[in-house]
């Protein structure tokens, strides 16, 4: 194998690993984004339930 072929093979391997690394980071980014959205929705629902409970307590006292 000549030096030029070795260089081309190394460049192809480097490009393959770079693409794989970028794909993994993009997938992880989407996963964390989805988790963040679900956590925010869950937190918002809890706050809404607490507000409704507090409003019901106040109206029952009056």
Image (cartoon, grey):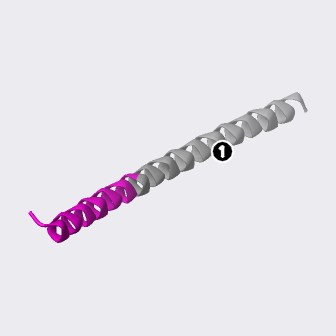
**Of residues 7 and 35, which is closer to you in this image?**
7
Tell me: residue 11, above or below residue 43: below
Task: Please identify the residue farthest to the left as the structure is shown.
Answer: 1
Tell me: 49 left or right of 2. Answer: right
Tell me: residue 15, above or below residue 37: below
Q: What residue appears at the point 18 percent right and 71 percent down from the top-left corner?
A: 4
Query: In the rendering, at what x and y percent does residue 57 appear?
Result: 81, 30
Tell me: residue 25, above or below residue 3: above
Q: What residue appears at the point 21 percent right and 69 percent down from the top-left corner?
A: 8
Q: Quadrant of the N terminus?
A: bottom left
Secondary structure mostly seen in the magenta stretch: helix
Label 1 SS: helix
| Bounds of the magenta segment | 1-24
Tell me: 30 left or right of 20. Answer: right
Query: In the rendering, at what x and y percent does residue 37 appear?
Result: 55, 50
Task: Please identify the residue farthest to the right as the structure is shown.
Answer: 62
Query: Quarter of the image holding residue 12?
Result: bottom left
**Of residues 39 and 27, which is closer to you in this image?**
27
Query: Quarter of the image holding residue 48?
Result: top right
Q: Quadrant of the C terminus?
A: top right
Q: Which residue is mark 1?
A: 44
Q: Is residue 12 magenta?
A: yes
Q: What residue appears at the point 66 percent right and 45 percent down from the top-left corner?
A: 44
Q: Is residue 23 magenta?
A: yes
Tell me: residue 55, above or below residue 27: above
Query: Quarter of the image holding residue 54?
Result: top right
**Of residues 27 and 52, which is closer to you in this image?**
27
| Number of other residues with Cα within 10 Å of mark 1, as a class: few under 14, some 14 to 19, many 20 or more | few
Q: What residue appears at the point 18 percent right and 66 percent down from the top-left corner?
A: 3
Query: In the rendering, at what x and y percent does residue 17 appear?
Result: 30, 56
Query: In the rendering, at what x and y percent does residue 27 appear?
Result: 39, 53
């Amino acid at each position: 194998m000549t030096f030029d072929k070795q260089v081309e093979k190394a460049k192809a391997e480097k490009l393959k690993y770079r693409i794989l690394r970028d794909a993994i980071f993009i997938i992880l980014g989407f996963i964390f984004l989805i988790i963040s959205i679900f956590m925010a929705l869950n937190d918002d629902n809890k706050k809404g339930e607490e507000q409704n409970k507090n409003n019901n307590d106040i109206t029952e006292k009056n």
